Image (tube, helix red, strand yellow):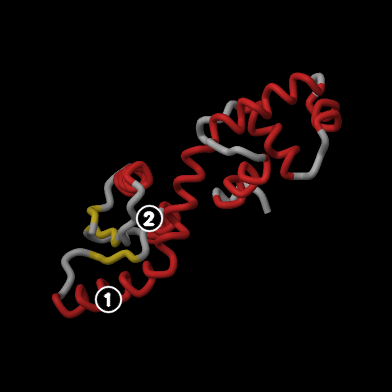
Amino acid sequence: MIHDEAGTIPDLIEKMATDGEWYPIIAFCEEPSPRQIVQAVLDGAVDYVAWPISAEDLNDTLARAIDKSEGAGNTKLREVMARSRLDRLTKREREVLDGVASGLSNRLIGEKLSISPRTVEIHRANMLNKLGANHTSEAIRIAIEAALVN
């Protein structure tokens, strides 16, 4: 459980991604607004409770969080770790990744971005290196896990 203050949930998720561990997050605060609850869930909380909470409601909330997290925890961790990797890329490297994921050749990516195919190759190599990917297919998988490519 984490008290919902500005930045606490994204910071905790970033820490879990760095450590390679995932735990369900239940956010809480006194008199939360609907917008605050929605943002907490979008940030990664599996549930939200208004504080104070009765012991019975707390036990029910914890049980639901454990049930939800068993399937979603690993997926969420992979998404957060993939986003963290993609954050290392420059804007141009992301554009090249988008082109690669769309199935474009280096020549077509270069035409689209108004750069030479050789420059595309350089950005592509840098992208793979920063992502820790050995092949383009791994880079595309990372982008999919980060939910950036449909």
User: Going 67% across and 40% down the picture, which residue do you hit?
Assistant: 136
| x and y, in percent, of residue 7 in the image | 33, 42
From what the image shows, is residue 118 above or below residue 17?
above
Q: Amino acid at mark 2?
A: Ala
Taking the image as shown, residue 84 lies to the left or right of residue 1, namely right
From what the image shows, is residue 79 above or below residue 55?
above
| x and y, in percent, of residue 150 in the image | 68, 54
How many numbered circles are shown?
A: 2
**Pointers 1 and 2 in contact (C-beta within 8 Å):** no
Q: 150 or 100, which is in the foreground? A: 100
Numbered label attached to residue 17? none
In the picture of the structure, the residue carrying the numbered disc 2 is: 40
User: Going 60% across and 45% down the picture, which residue do you hit?
Assistant: 143
Q: How far separated are the C-alphas under marks 1 and 2?
A: 19 Å
In the picture of the structure, the residue carrying the numbered disc 1 is: 63
Q: Secondary structure at mark 2?
A: helix
Q: Quadrant of the N terminus?
A: bottom left
Taking the image as shown, residue 36 lies to the left or right of residue 51, namely right
Q: 126 or 16, which is in the foreground? A: 126
| x and y, in percent, of residue 9 in the image | 33, 49
> Which tag, 1 or 2, sits closer to the chain's start?
2
